[in-house]
Amino acid sequence: MALQRFTLGMLAELDGGRIRAAFEQAVRRCEQDCLDRPAVGRGRQVVLTATFTPVCGQDGELDACEVQFQIKDSTPKRESKVYSGQLTAGGLVLNDLSPEDARQVTIDEIGPRKAVGS
């Protein structure tokens, strides 16, 4: 590629198309996350950052300008529901049969009762 003024269109061809490919991969990850988790209403992002760094010559004047591109995608965090826990001397305990109340017990967890009149 001969010297040309930088444009957004040129970005697709730089580095053998690697920047374009990275951007497209980031878009696909966001698309897939939307398909996987449509009920998560928070947005997905693809960010293309161009960083321009001046390079000074020995005379202190601008000699060149380096440019680097970064493609970053982000999706909402994957979170579980909130589980009620109880702290005991042995540590945190959870109740998988009643995740909203760690103190809730089931009938099979209640010890045997004495019959009336025994």
Image (cartoon, rainbow, N blue to C red):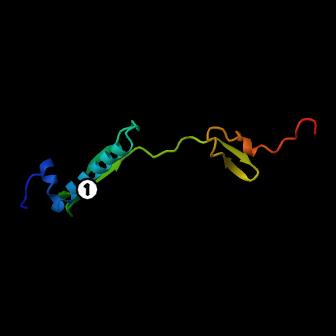
Residue located 62% across and 46% down the image: 96
Q: Nearer the viewer, residue 110 or 103?
A: 110
Residue located 63% across and 44% down the image: 97
Tally the numbered discs: 1
Q: Is residue 12 left or right of residue 47?
A: left
Q: In this view, does 83 lie to the left or right of 114?
A: left
Q: Is residue 63 left or right of residue 86?
A: left
Is 97 above or below relative to 4? Answer: above
Residue 30, percent from left and from top: 32, 46
Residue 82, percent from left and from top: 57, 40
Residue 54 sits in which quadrant? Answer: bottom left
Is 110 above or below relative to 14? Answer: above
Q: Nearer the viewer, residue 50 or 96?
A: 96
Q: Which amino acid does label 1 sit on?
A: Ala
Question: For mark 1, does the 10 Å Cα neighbourhood hold few (<14), some (14 to 19), or many (20 or more) residues?
Answer: some
Residue 73, percent from left and from top: 33, 49
Is residue 46 among what the camera can see? yes
> Farthest residue in the right direction?
118
Q: Which of 104 and 22 is in front in this view?
A: 104
Is 98 above or below relative to 49? Answer: above
Residue located 76% across and 51% down the image: 89
> Farthest residue in the bottom direction?
58
Is residue 51 among what the camera can see? no
Query: What is the quadrant of the C terminus in the image?
Result: top right
Query: What is the quadrant of the N terminus in the image?
Result: bottom left
User: Tag 1's secondary structure?
Assistant: helix
Residue 51, percent from left and from top: 26, 52
Is 26 above or below relative to 104? Answer: below
Q: Name the residue under label 1.
A: 22
